[in-house]
Each structure stands twice: as C-alpha cells, then as structure tokens.
Amino acid sequence: MVIAENTKAPPRPAPVPPRRRWRPWGADGVTGWALVTPAVVLIGIFGLLPVLMSLQLSFQHSDLLTPETPWVGFDNYRKMADDPVFLEAIKHTIIYTALFVPGTMLVGLLVAAAMNRSVRFISVYRTAAYITMAVSTISQGIIFLWLTDRDYGLVNAALNGVGVPSQPFLASPSQAIYVIVAMTIWGWTGFSVIVYLAALQGVPAELHEAAAIDGAKPFTRFRTITVPLLGPANLFLLVWLTINALQLFDEVYATTRGGPLRATTVIVYYLWDQAFVHFDAGYAAAMAYALFVVILLVTAVQFRLARRYAHHP
Amino acid sequence: MTVDVAGSRWRLPFSPWHLVLIPLSFLLVVPLLWMLITSLETEGEANHFPPVLFPAKPRFANYTEAWAQAPFGHFFLNSLTVTVVVLVSNLVVCSLAGYAFARIRFLGRGTLFVVLMATLMVPFQVTMIPVFLIVKWFGVNVWEGLGIDHIGALMLPNLATAFGIFFLRQFFQTVPVELEEAARVDGTSRLGVLFKIVLPLSLPAMSTLAALTVLTSWNDFLWPLIVITSEDQMTVPLGLSYFQGAHHVQWPLLMAANVMSLLPMLLVFIGAQRYFVQSVASTGIKG
Amino acid sequence: MAEVEFRNVTRSYLGGVTALKGLNLTVADGEFLILVGPSGCGKSTALRLLAGLDKPTDGEIRIGGQVVNGLGPGERDIAMVFQNYALYPHMTVYRNLAYGLRQRKTPRAEIERRVRETAELLQIGELLDRKPGQLSGGQRQRVAMGRALVRQPQAFLLDEPLSNLDAKLRNQVRGDLKRLHRELPVTSIYVTHDQVEAMTLGDRLCVMAGGEVQQIGSTDDVYNRPANTFVAAFMGSPPMNLLPGEVRSGTLHLGGSQLTAVPCPDGPVTVGARPEHLRLDSAQADGVVQARVDVVEPLGSHVLVTTIVGDETRVIVQAPAGTDLETGTPVGLVLPAERTYFFDAETGTALLSRERIAL
C-alpha cells in the first residue's frame, strides 16, 4: 500500500484477486469435467443413446427377443399411414388433448382465483386443491372406475337423483374418452392451481387497488388487469399440458385398457401395446418417433403464437 | 389479491368466500373421500344402489385382507428402495454437474449443456424400447439385479435427469459469486467452496428438487410395467394395478388396497407441501 | 367543494393493534396537506382509509361534505399516486392514463383530449405509445401523476410518490409538484416520512406518531413552536437536542450547570435547543452548560460538533466553518435566549407556548 504524503490521496485498497481466465486444460477444466462426468455418462447412456437407437430401430423389424433385426427401410412408417387403428388412435388423442388442455387450464384458473385470498383456513382449502397432484395415475383410474360404475357408482346415483338415467360411462365406446378427460382434469387440477395461484400472487396488490380507484368493478379488474398478466403462466400450462396430453397412457391402462372397442386407444397406448404385447418393436419405435416430431412441432407452434399475441392491446 | 374495499354491506362474522370455498374444496376431494368410505364398507354395502354413504360399522378387515391377498409389504419396500436410491443419486449427481455448469469454465461447457437439455424434449416413449434393451444388456452382462424384472432396472435409467441439472444450475447461479470468491481468497479449494459454502445454502432448492423426484419416482407406472413381471419386484403403482386385475369387482377390498397405496404419498405431500408447491411454481415461472 | 374531513377515525385490528386512534382532521378545499411521521405512525393507514382501500373501525370520513364510509374507492372521485406507481404493465402509457376515464364511460373524444392535455402538462407526450417497462423511474412517476390528474378528481392522494427516485430527481420533482399545485389547486393529501419533503411542500403539516396526531400546523408552527418532544426531535436535521434538567426555585439545573430566571414551575423538565441556535463558548464562561467535544464533522458551510453533556447526553452544535476542536476538549454550550424550549419531563408536552428566557 502506498501512502502519499502531501497530496493526501486516500490509501489504495488491497488488490482484488483477478478473475480466473478461461483455461480449459488447467485445474478448472479438469475439475469441471470431473464433476459433470457421472451425469454425462448416465444421461448419455439412458437419454441420448436411446434416441439414436430408437431411430435405428424404427427402420428395422424387431421383436425384442431374437437378436436378428433385419432392415426394412421405411416400411414401419408406411405401415403407420395405412393402419386404421393408428389413425383412430390419432383421432382419439386429438380429441382428448383438445378437451383436456383448455379444461384443466380453466378449472385451474377458476379454483386459483377463488383461493387467492387470505381468509381463515385458506391453507386447508388450498391443500385440498393441490392434493390431486399426489394421487398416482393408477389410483385415479381405480377411483373413477368405481365412481362411474354403471350399477353402483356414486355419479350415477347423483344423476338418478336429478332424473337422469344411469350412464355406462367407461363401459361405453362413445362416453369413455370423455370420462377419461374428466378424470385427468381432476388429476391435473392441483398442478394447474399451483401455477395459476403463483401467477395471481405475482400480480402486485397495488395494481388492483389502482384499478379499483380508477373505478373498475371486481370482474372488470379481473378481466382487464389480472388475466392479461397471466400470459406466462398460460403459455407454460398450454405447452406442458399439451405435451402430457399427447403422451396419455397410465390412466387409459388403469381403466379401459384402450377399450371398449378401442374407443380410448390413444397413441401411446397403441405404441406400448405394439411393443410389449405384440412385440413389434420396430413399428412401435416408428410411431414413437412420429409422436416425438408432432410434439416438437406443436410446442414450436405454441411458442410462436404466444410471441405473436404476447403484446396484444 | 382481492382488494378489501369499503362499501361492502356484509357484516357476517366470517368472510362470505367460505361459502364458495367449502363446497369447492369438498368437490375436489370427494373422489378420495368416497374411496375411503367404500374401503370401510362390506361387499353388500358397496354393491348396493343407491350407494350406502355411511357403513353400519367400519370394516377394517378389508385392509388386513387386502394386505394378505398381495405382497404389499414387498410393494412398499421396493418403491421405497427405488425412490431413495434415485433421490440420493439425483441430488448428488445433479448438484455436482449443476455446479460445474453454473460456476466452472471448462472446454465444451456450452455445447454439452445444450445437448443434455435436448434430452428433456424427447418423450419417454421414444427411449423406452431401447432403454429396455440396454437394461436387459446390463442384467445379462453386469449384474442380474440391474436387469429385467429386478428393481435395479427401475433405478438405473433415472439416476440422473437433465431436469435436475437444469434446476440446480439455475439455483446455483443465484448464489452471490462474492461468497464463493471470498472463500477462495481465504484459501478454500474449488470443491471446498461447493461443499462448504454453496451446498449449505442450497437446502431449499434441494428440498424442492427432492419433493419432485420423490413424487415422480414413487408414482411412476409405465416403466415398471414394461420391466417388471414378478410380484415380488413390483412397486406400489404396479402392484396396485396387479391387485386390481385379480380383484376388480371386489370394490371394498380394492379401495382398501388403493387407500394403502395412496397414503404414503399423500402424507409426504401434506407434510412437505411447501416444497411441492415451490417445485411447480418455480418451473412455471421460469417456463 | 372538495373539503376532506376525518371525524374521529379509528382503525384497529384483531389482536389489539390500533393503527389510527381517533383522527380528527379537516383539509380545506385546494389545500396541500402533508401527513408526516415515522413508519408505523398511521399516516398510510389514514390515506388508505380515505381512498376506500380499507374500512375504518370507527369514525366518519367525508369528501366534499358527503359521508363516504359506505362507498368503494371507485365511487369517491379521488385519485391516488402510489409509492411504486402501480402502472398497468401490459398497457401503453396512453391506455394507462385513459383507463380511469374509460371505466366511467367517458366519450372517446373527451378521453383523447384530456389525456393529451395532461401528457402535455407533465411533458410525457412522446411516451404515450410506450409501455411502463420501457420508461425510466422519473418518467414512470410522471405517468403515475398523469393518471391521477387526468381524472380531475375532488382530491389527490399521494403515497410517498418521491421515495423511489434518486436524490437529484427528487429535488426536481418536488419543485414540479409545488408548481403543479399552484396551477391546479386540487385538495391534496400527501404522505411522507421525509420531514424535509414535508416542510418544503406542504401548506400545512400533520405530524403523526403511534397512530395519533402530534401536531397540525404550518412549517413555521411545527418547526419553531413544536407541541411536544416528538415533533421537536422529528422536524429538523440534525434534530433538536433534548436534555434532561430540573427546575428548582426558578433556577434551571442542567448537566452540572445552573441557569437562572427560568419561567417554569419547579420539577424535572426536558430542555430543547436546536443545533443552529446553540453556540460554543469557553468552558469557563458564565452561565454555560459544561460539555466536552466528541466528534467534529466539517460540512463545508458549517461544522457539526457533537458534544457530550454530563455522562452520556449527546448535544449537536452547528458551529461556523473552520471550527476545529480536539476530542475531549471541555467547552461551554450557550443556550439561545429566545430559542430554548421547555417540555414536561414525563409527557413531553411543551410547557411554554413562546420561549423567552433571560439567562
């Protein structure tokens, strides 16, 4: 430290250690790689390698047992286009997604809006809303099979109470998919509520107060101030729920096994069925890849649309 | 937040919102309540229309019978083992990698991160068939316990997830660099900083990741379905499904089995609710 | 008529906390009244009650002669400028300004006219198409003001609107506010914890602490004739010095010194004197209070000398520039003839309405 005499300059502070320069093969480089190696190995083997293997598999004929897997080119893909069951599965998946996603978002938003206040016991109410998240898909399936049982189910009892005759629900080819929509909306409500509640709480109270002073009634405030600010939450749920909807499997397995009469066969169910029940793994891999591409496209489109409409007046 | 504005004419001793919230909460929980009620009924009461809302005498025997009909003890033990191993592995591997990505400059860091994150976009259905083959290979060539029809196969593909790395990296980046630099100036080693400074500060983030990992691992169904066929290797969801297959019209019994299967996760959820909420909310906000 | 009146307004909460205890205050039409006090004193509570964002537990609030207790904030014809501005982030500046007018179904042409007029007045005309996120702190503050002005309300409520601005901007905006009020004398109630802001801006000040009014008066009243020790110490920077003393048979005993002819009844008193009114003299001089120098802070135009009287009472004296004393030097404090204040030692209330003692 240099202390000048006459000029009375303040003493210079101790020098700060210089920021490490980027030295890729110094101690830093080795440490860095050492730390990421376990993750890289694991994800490499179980995440990246399978992606490539699956692609290869889709061009082969495999039954998962015999080691010989002859190359069949685009046969599997062509098969998809001609397979009526697959085309049906696509239709079912689309119907399901189109109902499930907006349904879950709407229910989640309404419940979150109701729960976004600090009355007594609010944490109890919120727990009730969240708890569906902890219920496994199989449990959900079993519960709803029982609830919608044609002969002894609670739902039919309630319907009869208001004069509506008992419905077959999951036993009916025309109704089953809609019951699954309702069931999965219930299952995902917890998740949706958490997202929306966090977003609602992110809106500063002052904005509502300013709007109230400006003369806006409660519902107008909700419509003009709150909802527009939920953009990010909406986008997140839209993307996440759509991705999950397109991959529906567990709940179908737990209730209808794709029936009745294949009415609830969705893409992934059919895929699984082909791979592990009929042992046509190559075909299944091709379908999986097709689904993958669809998911990527849909997600990309959703992001693009969101960006376009993010700054609407 | 609602604005508590002057001008409302209500003078009830409690907020009118309770009149909305109580039925709403009830409606949301009704399926679970109905499951519970049915699990305590006799077959006669269950197979009755209109349904019996309150059993004459709660039949706890349903639970002991369900337990006897299938190796639930094995189911729980297997689920527990798999979940614990996956949890610990994820926390360890992902924090090491997450820290490296967050704070250490090494060759290829950027590219490597992008490649790993790309795996998040791939749906499970694409990888499940090859992973099945890989796991089969492990079972044959490394150790039987890792192969088909063993719980090791359930652990292996899930020991580290790109999501865990992403999540922790995000968090580590919010720890002030100055803390680490101060420790380095004091002579702590690179790794020492991770263990002595950063990790102790990361408890909330780790708890959040833990909550999510436990939930996903415990409730996982498709992968166990593919890999496991022997009863004694089944996890709880798979075991329940198996039980359902054998007893699908014995509703009280089935519901009792369902309650038993649900209970652990429900309790964990309620107890650690804060972390579950945080895990969803934080991913939601960062998208 | 846009007179604002608080009649015995109380706000208490479950658990026994009372934020506001029986506030009685009338703000004349066109007056700029400042509620000033430390945090927790009740000033923000009073403002929110006036705005309708909170309900009083007791008492009546009137705006323009009309009781507004049962009216919501949107029905009271008031406008508020928030501390954090509370601008609608997803709307342009234009729409932020227009929002209140649109809620009242004002015709489009009228809205256009008023928004542009207000924007002109506040010099934010070029910002009308931008969103709040694209504005600087000062610009946002002006938009917040504009949103209130464009409504042409009966009363303006301002909740610490300058606290988020940097010092330089704050001074500038303070001047702008004063000018604005001269041009548009709308009844204004302004809340701040900064006593400098309060003194420079207000027609009248209402000093509050602990939910109660300590004193209402002009800057001059509050500064030169403080009603109690709280007001005396709160207003002014550095604050008024308060020393414990005792009067016996007309003589003030203070920190080992004695001063005669004190027109106070016998008993313990708290003596107050502002730093700028005290003088430093030699410790041997007549009638001075004994003290010793502790800290000397030169500020360019003057020097603040902190002294210690007795064992531990700190007294700050404003001394002329160039004063240089060593720590520990014994000095004598000269109490000012006309500016020594006497307060009841227990309650803190001022004992003399005009301070005149001969030393």
Image: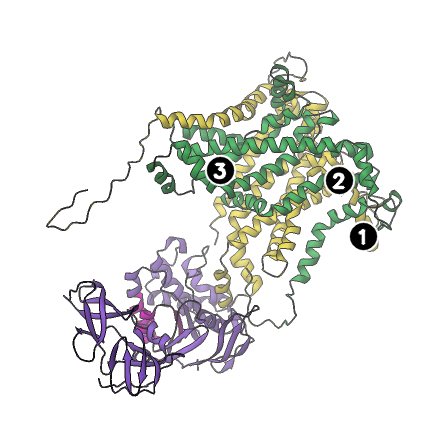
Chain colours: A yellow, B green, C purple
Q: Marks 2 and 1: which is nearer the front?
A: 2
Chain letter for mark 1, please.
A
- For image coordinates 69% across by 32% down, the residue present is B77
Amino acid type, label 3: Leu
Chain letter for mark 3, please.
B
Task: Assign a secondary structure to mark 1.
Answer: helix
Amino acid type, label 1: Ala
One can see residue A74 in this view: no
- For image coordinates 56% across by 37% down, the residue present is A298
- For image coordinates 33% across by 27% down, the residue present is A23
- For image coordinates 77% across by 48% down, the residue present is B34
Task: Assign a secondary structure to mark 3.
Answer: helix
Which numbered marker is on residue B258?
Answer: 2
Quadrant of image for the C terminus of chain C: bottom left
- x, y percent for residue C307: 24, 68
Please say whether residue A50 is one of the residues in the magenta stretch: no
Distance from Cα at disc 3 to Cα at disc 2: 34 Å
Distance from Cα at disc 1 to Cα at disc 3: 48 Å
- x, y percent for residue B100: 43, 32
Start and end of the magenta stretch? C172-200
Contact? badges 2 and 1 (CB < 8 Å): no
Amino acid type, label 2: Asn
Task: Assign a secondary structure to mark 2.
Answer: helix
Discs 3 and 2 carry the same chain letter? yes
Q: Would you name the residue on which mark 3 appears? A: B168
**Local crowd at mark 3 within 10 Å, few (<14), some, or many (≥20)?**
many
Total of numbered circles in the picture? Answer: 3
Q: Would you name the residue on which mark 1 appears? A: A158
Name the magenta segment's main secondary structure: helix
Q: Nearer the viewer, residue C126 or C31?
A: C31
